[in-house]
Amino acid sequence: MTSTKTRLYDAFATSGKALASGKRLELLDLLAQGERTVDALAKAAGLNLTTASAHLQTLKRAGFVATRRDGVRIHYRLAGDDVARLFALLRKVAESHQAAVPAARDAYLGGDDAREVGREELRARAAAGDVVVLDVRPVEEYLAGHIPGARSIPVDELPHRIGELPEDTEVVVYCRGEYCVLAHDAARLLTDHGRRAIRLSDGMLEWRLAELPVATGARRDRHPPAA
């Protein structure tokens, strides 16, 4: 009995060990936005190809990610929505019970004066047409899945494309999730340029997990400069 119980808990521990790396958690965060190649993941996570591949293999052995081959390219994706839920829950539990997390979060995200809005309020205001919903993630993430009706302007393009946004309408910005700095950077930039910026209180990860509508493809971003 003891040996079989030990084997069971050792099997559970394999999952825990796979999560015991900040870079592997970052890879899960990226994969929660959609399928990616090893090359794309390595670039987005700031890793060399060998290190990224090793981390992904660890996650695969634990059952957290799955793969498909397209010619010579290997594409990775999360193994299921339950993996995304585990990742989201892990972050919230860490924030609630680990003293170092809130300070690290605040140092990373920085401060801004933007008001936050919840998912349901965003849906109501977007349906009423009194806000512009702006997705500031990289284009490939927007194409893989975004809030219906959202415009796509990646945060690194925003400084020279602010003129595409109407001056008299509040802009709700969102990115990957609650701990994604892109929306904070975008809100600060918009505010500095005199725009009324609001942040979604979380992001695309939580939107998907709430089983809210998701649109794919059809980048909606090219608009003439606002009058």
Image (cartoon, rainbow, N blue to C red):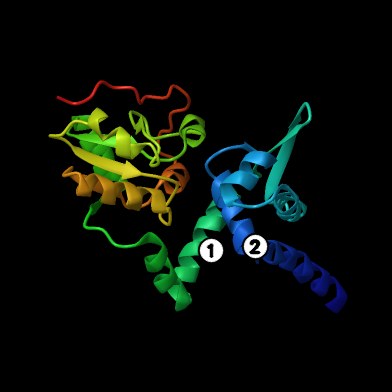
How crowded pointer 1 is (Cα within 10 Å; few <14, some 14-19, many 20+) is rated as some
Please name whichever residue, 41 or 95, is drawn nearer the observer in this view of the structure.
Answer: 41
Between the residue at mark 1 and the residue at mark 2, the CA separation in whole angstroms equals 10 Å
Q: Relative to residue 220, is residue 99 depicted above or below?
A: below
Please name whichever residue, 115 or 8, is drawn nearer the observer in this view of the structure.
Answer: 115
Q: Quadrant of the C terminus?
A: top left
Residue 60 as seen in the image, left or right of residue 31: right
- Tag 1 near tag 2, CB within 8 Å: yes
- Which of pointers 1 and 2 lies earlier in the amino acid sequence? 2
Identify residue for label 2.
Answer: 19
* Between marks 1 and 2 in the image, the one whose residue lies nearer the viewer: 2
Residue 119: x and y in percent read: 31, 45
Seen as rendered, the residue at the extreme front is 160
What's under tag 1, amino acid-wise?
Leu
Q: Residue at x 84, y 78 (%)?
A: 2
Q: From where the camera sits, is residue 76 visible? A: no
Circle number at residue 90:
1
How crowded pointer 2 is (Cα within 10 Å; few <14, some 14-19, many 20+) is rated as some
Residue 189 as seen in the image, left or right of residue 179: left
Residue 149 as seen in the image, left or right of residue 144: left
Q: Secondary structure at mark 2?
A: loop
Q: Residue at x 34, y 62 (%)?
A: 110
What's under tag 2, amino acid-wise?
Leu
Q: Relative to residue 1, is residue 49 depicted above or below?
A: above
Residue 47: x and y in percent read: 65, 52
Q: Quadrant of the N terminus?
A: bottom right
Q: Secondary structure at mark 1?
A: helix
Residue 208: x and y in percent read: 46, 42
